[in-house]
């Protein structure tokens, strides 16, 4: 009987060792896969940034894994040349495929103009009070504002923003709300 117990113990030890080796192999394979994926992401990111740098445009790019391929996110200041971004996407995909031997599934664009909107609001709120201020030399900070607003593409988009009426919010008593609500509900019932 002692022999059978040792055979079972030996078999369990071998099985345990096989399971431990399988788990270690799985962990090592995942670590290698994660490193390769991170290296691919960095390569795609660098390739996209370099592609736009060659054309004279500074962009920020990021990339992440999505399904079988990768998805890139490109952030740039708004420019007229990006109006046909779907055409640029095709050339960027081809460039990444040739340079990195990787496929981009999607490219998302982000054109933040929040700074420009804030600059327009600031320039409207700091309008000169009299003629003497308009003739004087602009301060160093004002030169920067003028440079930010010199992009015709941004100005074209902000033109509609400037003329949007600003909503006015006032507080009304609850009784007024109830009166208006009941009037509206009575009108709807009469229409039916």
Image (cartoon, rainbow, N blue to C red):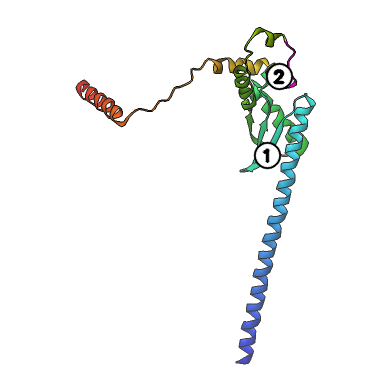
> Could you tell me which secondary element the residue under label 2 belongs to?
helix
| Left or right of 40, for residue 119 | left
Element under disc 1: strand
**Real-space CA distance between mark 2 and mark 1, rounded to the nearest whole angstrom:** 37 Å
Q: Is residue 141 left or right of residue 130?
A: right
Question: Of marks 2 and 1, which one's residue comes earlier in the chain?
Answer: 1
Query: In the image shown, does 139 or 188 lie closer to the viewer?
Result: 139
Span of residues in magenta: 136-143
Magenta residue check for 62 = no
Residue 63, disc: 1
Which class describes the residues within 10 Å of circle 2: few (<14), some (14-19), or many (20+)?
Answer: few
Image location (x, y in percent) of residue 56: 78, 24
Quadrant of the rendered structure where residue 162 is? top right
Residue 166 vs residue 94, the one in the foreground: 166
Query: Within 10 Å of the Cα at label 1, are there few (<14), some (14-19), or many (20+) other Cα atoms?
Result: many
**Which of the image's four quarters has the N terminus?**
bottom right
The residue lying at 64 percent from left, 26 percent from top is 115
Q: Residue furthest bottom?
A: 1
Point out the frontmost of discs 2 and 1.
2
Q: Which numbered marker is on residue 142?
A: 2
Q: Is residue 139 magenta?
A: yes
Q: As drawn, is 166 to the left or to the right of 186? A: right
55 relative to 35, above or below:
above
Q: In this orientation, which residue lies closer to the viewer: 103 or 189?
A: 189
Query: What x and y, as percent, mark residue 174?
Result: 31, 31
User: Where is residue 157 drawn, in percent x and y?
Assistant: 60, 18
């Amino acid at each position: 009987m002692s022999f059978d117990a040792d055979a079972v113990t030996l078999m369990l030890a071998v099985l345990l060792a096989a399971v431990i080796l399988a788990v270690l192999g799985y962990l090592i394979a995942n670590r290698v896969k994660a490193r390769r994926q991170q290296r691919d992401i960095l390569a795609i990111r660098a390739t996209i940034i370099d592609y736009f740098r060659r054309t004279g445009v500074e962009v920020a790019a990021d990339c992440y894994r999505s399904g079988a391929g990768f998805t890139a996110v490109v952030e740039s200041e708004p420019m007229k040349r990006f109006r046909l971004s779907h055409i640029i996407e095709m050339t960027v995909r081809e460039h990444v495929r040739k340079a990195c031997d990787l496929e981009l599934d999607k490219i998302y664009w982000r054109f933040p103009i929040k700074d420009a909107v804030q600059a327009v609001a600031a320039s409207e709120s700091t309008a000169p009070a009299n003629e003497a201020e308009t003739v004087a030399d602009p301060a160093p900070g004002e030169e920067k504002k003028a440079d930010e607003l010199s992009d015709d593409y941004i100005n074209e988009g902000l033109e509609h923003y400037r003329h949007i009426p600003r909503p006015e919010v006032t507080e009304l008593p609850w009784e007024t709300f109830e009166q208006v609500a009941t009037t509206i509900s009575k009108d709807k019932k009469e229409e039916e």
